[in-house]
Image (spheres, rainbow, N blue to C red):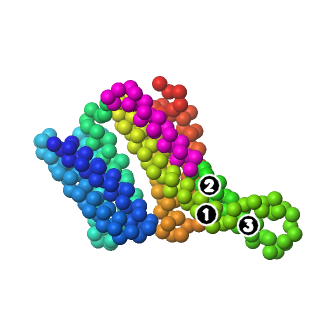
Amino acid sequence: MHLLWLRVATVLYFAASYAIFPAVLYKSERARRWCVHLGGMAFFFHFVSAVEMLVQAHRWVPVGAREAESLLGFAVAGLFFLAWWIYDAISLGVFALPITFFLVFVPSLGLKGYSFPSEGVRTSWLIAHITALLAAYAALGFSLLASLLYLVQERRLKAKPKSPDNSWWIPLDWLPPLDTLERIAHAMLLFGFPCMTVGLILGAVLVQETSLGAAYYGDPKVVASYAMWGLYVLLLYLRQTAGLRGRKAAYLSGAVLIVMLCVWAANTVSHVHRFGAP
């Protein structure tokens, strides 16, 4: 039964991870209540699952990577709820709840992993995995382009009153207004983030049919992918809560893009996940 409770907890963690973003980024009280209730229920079922798993096994220490991942997720969620209870630090959930979900997702598939019912289903998941990640990369690149054009437009507008006849800036009159560029950059991030999240989840399921096991998560490309996801969260968080705009937002978008390029470059050194690999 412990696997059933863990799967219930995983679904609830996912729902809480979804609710935490409007709760923090848009200060939605309704989303905050949903997040706390769903996360609290997830933590309860996670606790029941962990206790039942250890009692049935007649031991009090985890054995194997999946049991350790599950208990690590339980510790992360527990510390988050402790910080929320004492300091009302709900914003930490933007990082803690998705990380907890990723940690318990693979263990919830079972000790023997997940097997696709047919090759067609597996191919469909693979296509969805690749499509979601490519959409996330494209959105990130578009966001960075809009941020760079924002910097150019800002400099052009500042230079124009000083030298209205300066011909150097005339070819750039086609640039959209600053507000439009800012909204495009932000909208692309909001579109790309769920695409990247879905792509990583699908990738974690696909690897369950291989014999890679925990080695998959130590691969440079996989590590870089999750680091890029973390920077994505940080970028969205700072944009919304700290009012990060203009030059600083462009710099941070550039940092995320550099990590994305590292992910692509990691294809050449990856042993478990690269283009053309069997």
Q: Secondary structure at mark 1?
A: helix
Q: Amino acid at mark 2?
A: Leu
Going by the picture, which residue comes out furthest to the bottom? 161
Placement of 234 over or under 10, stated as above or below: below
Left or right: where 171 falls relative to 202: right
- Measure the alpha-carbon separation of dots 1 and 2: 10 Å
Residue 134 highlighted magenta (yes or no) = yes
Placement of 80 over or under 66, stated as above or below: below
Q: Residue at 27%, 59% (x, y): give it.
A: 38
Q: Are marks 3 and 1 in contact (CB under 8 Å)?
A: no
Of pointers 1 and 2, the one earlier in the residue sequence? 2
Q: Amino acid at mark 3?
A: Arg
- Measure the alpha-carbon separation of dots 3 and 1: 15 Å
Rendering coords of residue 236 (x, y %): 50, 60
**Residue 267 tag number:** none
Q: Amino acid at mark 1?
A: Glu
Q: Which of the 4 quarters of the picture holds residue 245?
A: bottom right
- Measure the alpha-carbon separation of dots 3 and 2: 17 Å
Q: Residue at 74%, 69% (x, y): give it.
A: 157
> Which residue carries the number 3 mark?
155
> Which residue carries the number 2 mark?
144
> Which residue carries the number 1 mark?
182
Q: Which residue is at the front of the view, 47 or 157?
A: 157
Rendering coords of residue 197 (x, y %): 44, 48
Q: Which residue is at the front of the view, 41 or 76?
A: 41
